[in-house]
């Protein structure tokens, strides 16, 4: 079962804006996307911020680690120049700011919990507890069956982060992220009480997709960047995918 949007802008604005920034969220929205995926990591002082890489060098200049840098210092870094001069000065946003933007603009969120190595449990726990607080009203209004698209969906490659998220925010659903689908995937999903499997489309076959769907769990693929591949996997029963090519694949793609 899948209660969520089907076409999701990856890292906010895909290839059109610097990933995991508010500019990226605005860009996805300008293209009509009301569903985003982004990555959340803890700053050195334990504040959830949007960031993919644990080390500086790619999206922010210089050397250093996110886990050694305070949220205030991260907010002063330039996470836009690497992408293009028109984004110079675009800060590393904190998670709470991005949730506020998404809520104000009716954007559904796939919150990928992206712990720096060694911070798996702490990241899952802190991100989930904050999300639970930010969505307290929506959680209280939820129908008993759950899986309500008024709530975000957590995902993570880290089993431990998702276990911690489950403990901290049991009312917010989880998807387990894997690059290749392991043979014991259903046992892992059960242990996490997860509603979906999120996997790399490159390693997905029709047989595997149908096996997952036969278990009545959601199946999301990353990162699908051609309409042709998107059509193919959707014909296999894939429920949703995130894409970098929000210029080629519209939010109402079918
Ligand atoms: O959540 C799907 C996808 O974003 C996972 O890979 O490395 O782009 O975060 P990555
Ligand atoms: Mg991600």
Image (tube, rainbow, N blue to C red):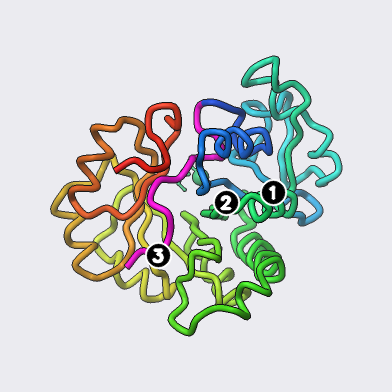
| Residue linked to disc 3 | 3
Q: Are marks 3 and 1 in contact (CB under 8 Å)?
A: no
User: Is 62 within the magenta?
Assistant: no
Q: Pinpoint residue 74: horizontal percent, then vertical percent.
A: 79, 39
Mark pair 3, 1: CA separation: 22 Å
Any part of residue 70 in sight: yes
Residue depicted at x 79% and y 31%? 77
Give above or below for 18 relative to 211: above
Using the image, tell me which numbered label, if any, was put on residue 101.
Answer: 1
Q: Chief secondary structure of the magenta span? A: loop
- Find the magenta span and give its range: 1-15
N-terminal label among 3 and 2: 3
235 or 129: nearer the viewer? 235
| Residue linked to disc 2 | 107
Residue depicted at x 71% and y 39%? 65
Check disc 1 and report its element: helix, strand or loop: helix
Q: Pinpoint residue 122: horizontal percent, then vertical percent.
A: 66, 63
Residue depicted at x 74% and y 29%? 90
93 or 137: nearer the viewer? 137
Residue depicted at x 33% and y 62%? 218
> Could you tell whether 125 is left or right of 244 in the image?
right
Q: Are marks 2 and 1 in contact (CB under 8 Å)?
A: yes
90 or 158: nearer the viewer? 90
Give above or below for 23 relative to 238: above
> Could you tell whether 210 is left or right of 170 in the image?
left
- Outermost residue, top direction? 85
N-terminal label among 2 and 1: 1
Mark pair 2, 1: CA separation: 8 Å
């Amino acid at each position: 079962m899948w209660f969520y949007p089907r076409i999701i802008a990856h890292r906010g604005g895909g290839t059109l804006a610097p990933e995991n920034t508010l500019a990226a969220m605005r860009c996805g929205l300008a293209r009509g996307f009301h569903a985003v995926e982004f990555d959340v990591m803890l700053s050195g002082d334990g504040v959830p911020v949007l960031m993919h890489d644990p080390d500086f060098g790619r999206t922010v200049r210089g050397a250093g680690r996110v886990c050694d840098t305070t949220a205030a210092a991260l907010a002063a870094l330039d996470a836009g120049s690497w992408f293009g001069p028109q984004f110079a000065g675009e800060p590393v946003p904190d998670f709470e700011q991005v949730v506020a933007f998404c809520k104000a603009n009716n954007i559904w969120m796939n919150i990928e919990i992206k712990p720096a190595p060694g911070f798996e449990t702490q990241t899952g726990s802190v991100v989930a507890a904050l999300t639970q607080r930010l969505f307290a009203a929506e959680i209280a209004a939820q129908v008993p069956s759950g899986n309500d698209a008024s709530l975000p969906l957590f995902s993570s490659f880290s089993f431990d982060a998702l276990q911690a998220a489950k403990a901290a925010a049991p009312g917010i659903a989880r998807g387990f992220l894997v690059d290749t689908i392991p043979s014991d995937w259903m046992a892992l999903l059960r242990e996490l009480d997860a509603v979906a499997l999120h996997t790399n489309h490159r390693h997905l076959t029709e047989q595997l997709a149908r096996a997952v769907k036969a278990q009545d769990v959601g199946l999301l693929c990353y990162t699908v960047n051609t309409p042709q591949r998107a059509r193919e996997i959707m014909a296999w029963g894939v429920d949703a995918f995130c894409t970098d090519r929000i210029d080629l694949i519209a939010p109402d793609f079918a």
